[in-house]
Image (cartoon, grey):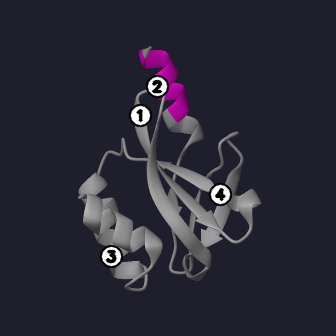
Amino acid sequence: MMLSIYLLSLVYQVKLTGEAIFGSNYYGRFLSVRYCDITDAYIVVLYDIPYIVIENANNHSTIYVSLWLDDLEGFIKSINEIVPPGNPLETMLNESH
C-alpha cells in the first residue's frame, strides 16, 4: 500500500507559477490550467487520498492535485497570494480549510 501511495505522489505532482497551476490529469499526464480559466474546483478521494480536481472550459486539461502535500499550509498560502480573489480554487481552499 505504501509503495502505491508513493508512486501516486510521484505521478500527481503540482507546480505553481504566477499565471497557472501545473498538475497531472487522471491518467498522469502533466498539464497546466491558467488561473483565469478555472471554472470549478472540488475535492474527491481516490485510493484513500484526497485530491483537488481543477476544471476549466477545456475538459482535456482537468488536473488533480493531491492534498497529501509536505506543506499544505504553504500551498494554501501561495494560492491565496497568487490566485485572484473569487477564483473557484481560492474559494474552495479557503472554505474547506
> Which numbered mark, 1 or 2, is in the foreground of this view?
1
Of mark 2 and mark 3, the one earlier in the sequence is: 2
Q: Secondary structure at mark 1?
A: strand
Residue 8: x percent and y percent?
A: 53, 32
Label number found at residue 5: 2
Q: Amino acid at mark 4?
A: Thr
CB atoms of marks 3 and 1 within 8 Å: no
Residue 46: x percent and y percent?
A: 49, 33
Query: What distance separates the C-alpha of mark 1 from that of mark 4?
Result: 18 Å
Q: Amino acid at mark 3?
A: Asn
Of mark 4 and mark 2, the one earlier in the sequence is: 2
CB atoms of marks 1 and 2 within 8 Å: yes
Please give the range of residues in magenta: 2-8
Q: Secondary structure at mark 3?
A: helix
Which secondary structure dominates the residues rendered in magenta? helix
Of mark 1 and mark 2, the one earlier in the sequence is: 2
How many residues crowd around disc 4 within 10 Å: few (fewer than 14), some, or many (20 or more)? Answer: many
Depth check: give the residue in front, 97 or 22: 97
Report the quarter where the C terminus lies: bottom left
> Which numbered mark, 4 or 3, is in the foreground of this view?
4
Residue of label 3: 80
Of mark 4 and mark 3, the one earlier in the sequence is: 4
Residue 20: x percent and y percent?
A: 57, 73
Q: Is residue 59 left or right of residue 79?
A: right
Q: Amino acid at mark 1?
A: Ile
Q: Secondary structure at mark 2?
A: helix
Q: Is residue 59 left or right of residue 51?
A: right
Residue located 66% across and 48% down the image: 25
Q: Amino acid at mark 2?
A: Ile
- Relative height, residue 51 to residue 34 (above, below): above
Label number found at residue 49: 1
Query: What distance separates the C-alpha of mark 1 from that of mark 2?
Result: 8 Å
